[in-house]
Amino acid sequence: MKIYTKTGDNGTTALFGGTRVPKHHIRIESYGTVDELNSHLGLIRDQDINTHYQELLMTIQDKLFTVGAILATDPEKAILKNGKERLNIEKISTNDIALLEKEMDTMNAALPPMTHFVLPGGHQTVSFCHIARCVCRRAERLASALNELEPFETNALRYLNRLSDYLFVLARKLSSDLQANEVKWIPEKK
């Protein structure tokens, strides 16, 4: 497979299905940000953290490729002439979303109750997790805007929403596991 095709030299790229759009199209911004998120998750997975979290992050990375594929598919060409879906992969399921919820519940049970907002930081691994959370929220905002223009599978959007919550709880759990200082944000009074 040749990496460079030169077909994007004019500032356009192809969606799954062949439609060419500008590289700044909201669809490209959406799945590009999901790809960026996936890279940040790889960075977290490469840290010295519990193997359970590493394995779950790998599962999440796989699901993000699915989300990216959904976002990269031209909705007008999603169904082939024979009636089959162009994108012949497992979609994001309610079970995928439930897994994130279950993991959050498990981690939260081992953490002190949250009484304040938390300032990102305290340990490099925790900071990587907060960065990934912010990128996930941006991916969700872009995907939400795209969904208003060209609706796509609702579970993909729900997954991004739940994933940002998961990354926040994971950051807190990693702070605890790594014995990092979790700094509460306490606003100064006037």
Image: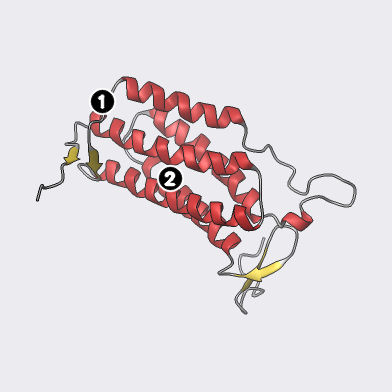
In this rendering, position of residue 92 left or right of residue 133: right
Q: From this viewpoint, is residue 89 visible?
A: yes
Q: How many badges with numbers are in the image?
A: 2
- Spatial CA span between label 2 and label 1: 28 Å
Q: Which residue is located at x 62 percent, y 41 percent?
A: 154
Local packing at callout 1 (Cα closer than 10 Å; few below 14, some 14-19, many 20+) is few
> Could you tell me residue 50's position as x and y percent?
35, 29
In the displayed structure, would residue 2 be above or below residue 36?
Answer: below
> Could you tell me residue 3's position as x and y percent?
61, 65
In this rendering, position of residue 11 left or right of residue 105: right
> Which is nearer the eye, 18 or 55?
18
Mark 2–mark 1 CB contact (< 8 Å): no
Looking at the rendered image, the quarter that the N terminus falls into is bottom right
Q: Which mark is residue 138?
A: none
> Which is nearer the eye, 6 or 90?
90
Secondary element type, mark 1: loop
Secondary element type, mark 2: helix
Q: Which residue is mark 1?
A: 113
> Could you tell me residue 89's position as x and y percent?
70, 40
Q: Which mark is residue 42?
A: 2
Residue type of the residue flagged with mark 2: Gly
Q: Which residue is located at x 27 percent, y 24 percent?
A: 111
Q: Quadrant of residue 9?
A: bottom right
In the displayed structure, would residue 142 be above or below residue 11?
Answer: above
> Could you tell me residue 135's position as x and y percent?
41, 52
Can you name the residue that lies furthest to the right here?
82
Q: Quadrant of residue 164?
A: top left
Residue type of the residue flagged with mark 1: Pro
